[in-house]
Image (spheres, grey):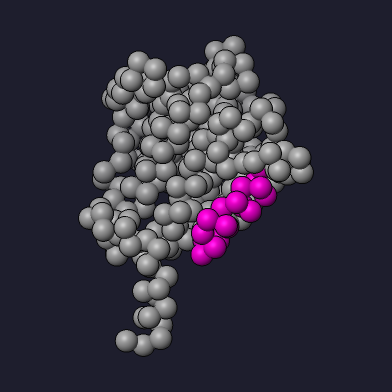
């Protein structure tokens, strides 16, 4: 065995229990180590998604978030600490600091910026998959339209109170987010954690599903979620709805306008 092989095996040791899972194996682990993933928003969902992906050993995680860590985040945003609140750290930077302590082998690129139509192109240009850690549909529409145009897979996830949803979008091979939700919902129609609250257990379930979908897209895309997963953690209801592709979809169908409607302020 030469030195290079020996150091490779050393590097893989931390993933030994993950590689025992047949769906991953050594070949899958090598693929993960080469993967480049973009996380848009690193609040509650993003904290859990980033933790899974970094500990699983993806090659690069680029994290965009324009907010700073606040005390009322800590009940559900699992990456952050009271120290981050005291230092008023930007979430992307605090996340990178904590994640590097968990796995120094992963390249972590914090981007302290709100993602919108103008900034997404540069953020996502060289990434394999995008994953949704946002809390609003305006940003999700931007991600969706970009991914449909660039033929890039992405994973949607959202939570509110005790309920959550997730959908995995592979452009050209199934519905996109706007096949299911054509128009941007108004603020009244789309409550957030700030208005309707959220439980950390809801977040952890949906974010874990999202991270799992990213891993499947990288290793075995045919195993992905092909419907809209709807979860209620209080009722312990898990349901998967079939979403048909809409031929008149404004993003992936004949209704293509090339514009994302209703975009003013994009808050994260
Ligand atoms: Zn569509």
Closer to the camera in the image, 66 or 207: 207
Q: Tell me which residue sits at (41%, 82%) in the image.
A: 4
- Farthest right residue in view: 87
Q: Position of residue 28 (x, y in %)?
A: 31, 60
The residue shown at (31%, 29%) is 227
Image quadrant assignment for residue 230: top left
**Residue 208 on the magenta span:** no
* Image quarter of residue 194: top right
Q: Residue furthest front?
A: 82
Q: Residue furthest left?
A: 22
Residue 233 picture quarter: top left
The answer to whether residue 96 shows anywhere in this view is yes
Residue under the image location 63 percent in, 31 percent down: 73
Q: Is residue 104 magenta?
A: yes
Q: Is residue 75 left or right of residue 267?
A: left
Q: Is residue 249 left or right of residue 110?
A: left
In percent of width and height, residue 220 lies at 28, 51
Magenta-colored span? 91-107
């Amino acid at each position: 065995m030469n030195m290079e092989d020996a150091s490779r095996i050393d590097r893989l040791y931390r993933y030994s229990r993950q590689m025992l899972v047949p769906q991953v194996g050594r070949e899958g682990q090598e693929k993960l180590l080469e993967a480049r993933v973009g996380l848009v928003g690193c609040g509650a969902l993003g904290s859990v998604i980033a933790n899974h992906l970094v500990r699983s050993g993806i090659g690069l995680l680029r994290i965009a978030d324009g907010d700073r860590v606040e005390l009322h985040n800590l009940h559900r945003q699992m990456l952050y600490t009271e120290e981050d609140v005291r230092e008023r750290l930007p979430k992307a930077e605090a996340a990178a600091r904590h994640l590097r302590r968990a796995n120094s082998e992963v390249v972590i690129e914090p981007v302290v910026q709100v993602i919108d139509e103008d900034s997404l192109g540069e953020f996502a240009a060289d990434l394999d998959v995008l994953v949704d850690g946002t809390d609003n549909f305006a940003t999700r529409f931007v991600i969706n339209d970009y991914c449909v145009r660039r033929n890039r897979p992405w994973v949607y996830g959202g939570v509110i109170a005790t309920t959550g949803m997730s959908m995995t979008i592979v452009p050209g091979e199934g519905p996109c987010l706007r096949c299911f939700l054509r128009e941007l919902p108004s603020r009244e129609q789309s409550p957030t954690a700030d208005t309707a609250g959220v439980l950390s257990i809801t977040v952890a379930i949906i974010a874990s599903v999202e991270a799992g979908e990213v891993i499947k897209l990288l290793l075995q895309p045919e195993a992905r979620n092909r419907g809209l997963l709807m979860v209620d953690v209080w009722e312990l209801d898990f349901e998967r709805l079939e979403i048909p592709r809409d031929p008149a979809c404004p993003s992936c169908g004949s209704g293509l306008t090339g514009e994302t409607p209703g975009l003013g302020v994009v808050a994260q």
